[in-house]
Amino acid sequence: MRYIKASFFILLTILLVYALNRTWGVVPAFGPLLSPFVGFWQNAETTEAADEELILKGTRAPVTIVFDDLAIPHVFAENDRDAYFAQGYLTARDRLWQMEFQTHAAAGRVAEIVGDRALELDRYNRRLGMGFGAERSVKAMLTDPRSRESVEAYTAGVNAYISQLSPAQYPLEYKLLGYKPEPWQTIKCAYFLKYMSGVLALGADDLNMSNVLRRIGPAATADLFPDYPFREDPIIPVGTSWDFKPVAVPATPPNAFTSSEPLAMKWPDHDPAIGSNNWAVGPQKSATGYPILANDPHLSLSLPSIWYQMQLVTPTMNVYGATMPGAPGVIIGFNKQVAWGVTNVGADVLDFYQIRFRDASQREYWHDNRWKPVTRRIERIKVKGQADVIDTVLYTHHGPVMYMAGQKPFAKNVPVGYAARWIAHEESNDFLTYYLLDRAKNHADYREALRYYGAPAQNFVFADVARDIAISPNGRFPLKWKDQGKFLLDGTNPAHDWQGWIPAAHNPHVKNPPRGFVSSANQSSTDPTYPYYINWQFAPYERGVRINQRLARMKQATPDSLRQLQNDNMNVRAANALPVFLNYVQPQKLTGQQSNALAVLKAWRYNNDVSEIAPTIFTEWTRQCMEAVWNDNFPSNDSTTLRYPSFDRTLQLAEKDPGANWFDDVNTPARETINDVLTQSFRAAVDSLTRQHGPLGTSWQWGKHKATRISHLARLDALSALNVQIGGGGGIVNATTERTGPSWRMVVALGPKPRAYGVYPGGQSGNPGSPHYLNMLETWRTGQLNELLFLLSADEKHVRIRRRVTIK
Amino acid sequence: MRQIIAIAVLSLLVQLVFPWWSLAVVSFAVCCWRSPGAGRAFLYGFVGVGIVWLLYALMIQLRTDGVFVGRMSELLFRTNGGVLPVLVTTLVSGLVGGLAGATGFFVRQASGNQIENRIS
């Protein structure tokens, strides 16, 4: 009996320890997590104040790091290698979980951490060829000695941090999810780039457009989905002459735009609110006579912060700016002579090809009048708590076959596959561009740096102390016939292949335009006179035109004038649309509440400020209006997905062709007019908002309705910033929407010594237990900027310097 | 009392080096060495181990501003407050320590030397 009791209690104790020592699905391992010795308590940090000396044995000479009051490191190294080593080390110290998680995501390795609920995501990333692309990129990176040194030193720095970590020091997320960091590898830097390409260069409407074409035919498609918008203000100012002799563009093949089967392939929507602003004002517009440059990249706002500020000083450079955890060097920043920034181009660099296989074995496919071999890539996906999943991905010369139509195991017909041709599969050394920009001294250096850049294509804005300003939509662009890839392409026809590249020197660019400023906000790169095809659609023009209007009027600009422009809340879409739309609303058909809402809209000055009610009504109305006008003509269902024409085209119809048949709802026998559509959608919008927020009142305010959210990467609300009260919105210069917004704001005034300002919604530390996790949020929310401390030497005295760390 | 102090001091020391569950080994060993009954052994283990986690957690919470502990409370227990994390932390460790302590007693009983030390 005694033995049974003793054995029972031994077993019970062991079971309890076991149960507390492991994760159960999403439930963390409470034992180690709650332990004050190793658990989350250990992640509670206080502000570090003491100087420190770290013996890492990874640098050639001692490196001094000066931390300022925002915990931003300023690295002083005697050689480049040591600087990148320190960058890797410091980034890992503040952001290890984030950098590993993002590269795991790109590599299709999330199921390894969270189990089978991430399996589809992993499969998607692998079928997209992320690994294939990363392997090619890392090869290019390691070929050039400059990028090789930076990537390898950065990797060594990250590993120097990981190797001396004890489990108690693991970032919180490892403790919550129950895994541990693995050594960093150079290919992870490439995976990070692919991750960014995935965010910025995966827009593809090819399939929806092919379905649209099938439904309404080529003439109506060309009419409703034009290649250049009704209202536009392109990045390269209209009238700029092209300083090159264009190379021959491949001829458009006959029957290029006839589509066959209706297509059911699901392509995840890519958020149109992901875009950015940048601009530079020339000497004639600036108070000091030196250019001033501004940039705010808009991304899905997330925590830990997307960017990590750093200054890197070596004999070859002194650069300050925003780095990205996972990539060596500064991505957006400035040095003594130059400043630069980026916005996304949105080029059509992802196309889908219909593949005709020879038979069900899928070993050969038809191209250029012969059968060509399919290569296979085995993807082994590890799944937490389960057996590995093996996925075989078929590769054609176009790229990986992402989807198979009619993928039924016993289908008799030979399946048709869709292969993805994507720019991120190309070998390219994008880091070299940033390496060179970090050291650039003038406009010629900037032009040289841009030559190496592949993807995701960016509008690189530039200003220097020699008083030059410039901008260039830049990246590797396939040399396409007009509208190639607007619709699905034929994978059997070599005329549909990408046939070379637009020469880098022919990428659109402008230097010192007569208007005295350059700018971009993801709108059309050029007007239709540009001799090459980049894409048929770009982000709507509203942010761009607002920026240009204000810059055109600006005189004696200071950094503060540019900061104010970054926070501009003018709703250009409303200013264009309301004077037209309001004419068609029939007031006699509105209830009391609806009439009150109409009165609010009529009194509005088109500002998306945080306490305005009109933006809430306008946004919901335009959404309902687009549905009402187009859903009957372009209904999506499980087997076919279509898309709607742009808002720009819809507004053009309302202005120029209000009698168009498109306003009729084809599903009703009656003939609806534009009056009916706009009145009905207005009523629906007000009713929907009433259901959501109660009667018209302060609960309808834009800030409350929008409730901007900065979400933790693992989607943990408790570690996120919720309901951030801020104005702006989609299509507004202050592009803060529900989930997306300015992930970094920077203003740099060039001069004898550059003066720069910046902020991001978060903080330097990725540790939710650090005082520097969210300490910049309020500054960001209120539209303020912190001065960026640009130090010239490690010994420089400044009140904002907090401590020094030496790495030996 | 001696046992509680022994468990507290020893479990603190081993946890500086070994994984968190080493506290169970300490509580087990001490109660196997000396414990008058299952209930008392559980109490020794619970208090000896729990007091260390309680004081360490409190110390960390007081040293930092408590914002983070509030976030963790939100994350783990869906309510924002500083009390619950400390309480649960103490309870979890106490439960393991106590159970290990009781096990220590029963093993001691099974090995037949419980009578001699009953009074200690």
Image: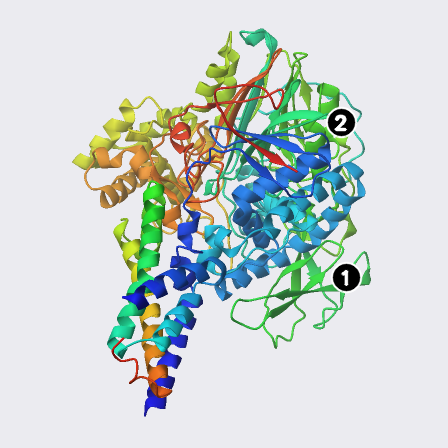
Residue A285, horizontal then vertical, whole percent: 55, 9
Q: Quadrant of residue A131?
A: bottom right
Mark 1: secondary structure: strand
B94 above or below B102?
above
- The amino acid sitting under disc 2 is Glu
Q: Which residue is mark 1?
A: A366
The first of marks 2 and 1 along the sequence is 1
Residue shown at 59% from the left, 51% from the top? A164
- The amino acid sitting under disc 1 is Trp
A701 above or below A166?
above
* Nearer to us in this view, A673 or A310: A310
Residue shown at 76% from the left, 55% from the top? A397
* Nearer to us in this view, A423 or A677: A423
Q: Quadrant of residue A577?
A: top left
Q: CA distance from mark 2 to mark 1?
A: 41 Å
Q: Quadrant of the C terminus of chain A?
A: top right
A722 above or below A338?
below
Q: Note whether residue A627 is visible.
A: yes
Q: Which residue is mark 2?
A: A448
Residue shown at 73% from the left, 53% from the top? A398
Q: Residues within 10 Å of mark 2 (few under 14, many from 20)?
A: some
* Nearer to us in this view, B32 or A352: B32
Q: Nearer the viewer, mark 2 or mark 1?
A: 2
Mark 2: secondary structure: helix
